Amino acid sequence: MSKGFLLVISGPSGSGKGTICAELLKRNKDLVFSVSATTRGARQGEKEGISYFFMDNERFQKMIENDEFIEYAKVHTNYYGTPRKFVTNQIGKGNIVILEIDVQGALQVKKSYPEAVLIFLLPPSMDELKNRLIGRGTESQEEIEIRYKNAFKEMKYIYEYDYFVVNDNIMEALKEIEAIIIAEKAKINRGKNILGKLLVEGGM
Amino acid sequence: MSKGFLLVISGPSGSGKGTICAELLKRNKDLVFSVSATTRGARQGEKEGISYFFMDNERFQKMIENDEFIEYAKVHTNYYGTPRKFVTNQIGKGNIVILEIDVQGALQVKKSYPEAVLIFLLPPSMDELKNRLIGRGTESQEEIEIRYKNAFKEMKYIYEYDYFVVNDNIMEALKEIEAIIIAEKAKINRGKNILGKLLVEGGM
């Protein structure tokens, strides 16, 4: 009935995008998670085409050259990227593809794939964002400070996005994102053939 | 937190916009129904400023001249119009104003108030639309035929709208419209001051 689209869930470190995306996928069986390509080796239990598309550096560089990524980035020594083909194939089937990504990545997506729908996840306050960064205990004190400072810079790109959702209560944030998905499906430009059908059925 | 806006619920005769709007207002206490101005006399029980803004023809004409209506129309011998000031006042208070209107009116609104959000209500099929027109028993056979034919013409203006909602099951249509309202509130351009607040609270 409705065309698929790419939904980008983004925000600074500590905004809760990982948790939100995991919950979104659990609750909505019609959503598809974007599968990234990477040059890093597969870890135990990771599956080709489900966890990642694993590939060597040469192939990744070739895909960059051929503009086959919606966005890509080098993290430490490895490359990660979102293959355009995977996304467009899924959208072609009418699916909604979810891409969880940092702010830099989201801005790349907007440039190279302007039809994407971008949601910026906000913490309820900057103090709470810091608390979350500390609370998860995966980063050093120095790393936390860097991420906290980056969050301020990243926040200023919010006007490049389509929607903002404050992630104070996770259930409320989820419901808001689910409402955005319903609304996006109801956009006129996503349902052109519906009218055709209706008028044909009516005997015109 | 979020700026108000004008939400136009429109569609052909028999699409169910009257029922939908009445239910929307019952279920959502934060919505405000747009109050029309009219030159027709008040009926028993109708209240000035709540049912309508009652006025004489001279005043109505003056308001037309001064571009004080977002849209207006002559129905039989009386004028009806949507006063711009009422709408902008309510929006200024952060309210969402609901305007139930036919397709011609909605197109006028779009021209004179482009920030409005337009929803086109569709019947599940043209046969069902005809059944509804017959079923309500308020129009003559001839009038039903006219409305049915007009519906086909009006349908072609759907691409001027922002959203489409198929009104098959009323509860589902309501939920979809409520999702659109939530999504519109979450649009970046409706919440500019949120970021300012957040960064101030964070100590910047």
Image: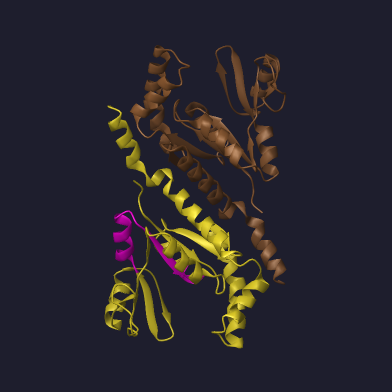
Chain colours: A yellow, B brown
Q: Can you tell which quarter of the image residue B159 is in? A: top left
Q: Can you tell which quarter of the image residue B137 is in? A: top left
**Left of B57 or right of it: where is B174?**
left
Residue A27 in picture, x, y percent from top left: 44, 61
Judge by depth and name the residue closer to the eye, A15 or A104.
A15
Image position of B61 with respect to A3: above or below: above
Image position of B92 with respect to A105: above or below: above
Quadrant in the picture for the C terminus of chain A? top left
Inspect this view and state whether residue B112 appears.
no
Magenta stretch, residue numbers: A83-107
Q: Can residue A90 be found in the magenta stretch? A: yes
Residue B63 in picture, x, y percent from top left: 67, 23
Inspect this view and state whether residue A21 appears.
yes
Residue B77 in picture, x, y percent from top left: 58, 11
Q: Can residue A149 be found in the magenta stretch? A: no
Which residue occupies 43% across, 12% down?
Answer: B140
**Left of B80 or right of it: where is A53?**
left
Q: Can you tell which quarter of the image residue A52 is in? A: bottom left
Image position of A58 with respect to A157: above or below: below
Which residue occupies 55% across, 16% down?
Answer: B75
Residue B136 in picture, x, y percent from top left: 46, 21
Counting labels gives: 0
Which residue occupies 38% across, 17% down?
Answer: B145
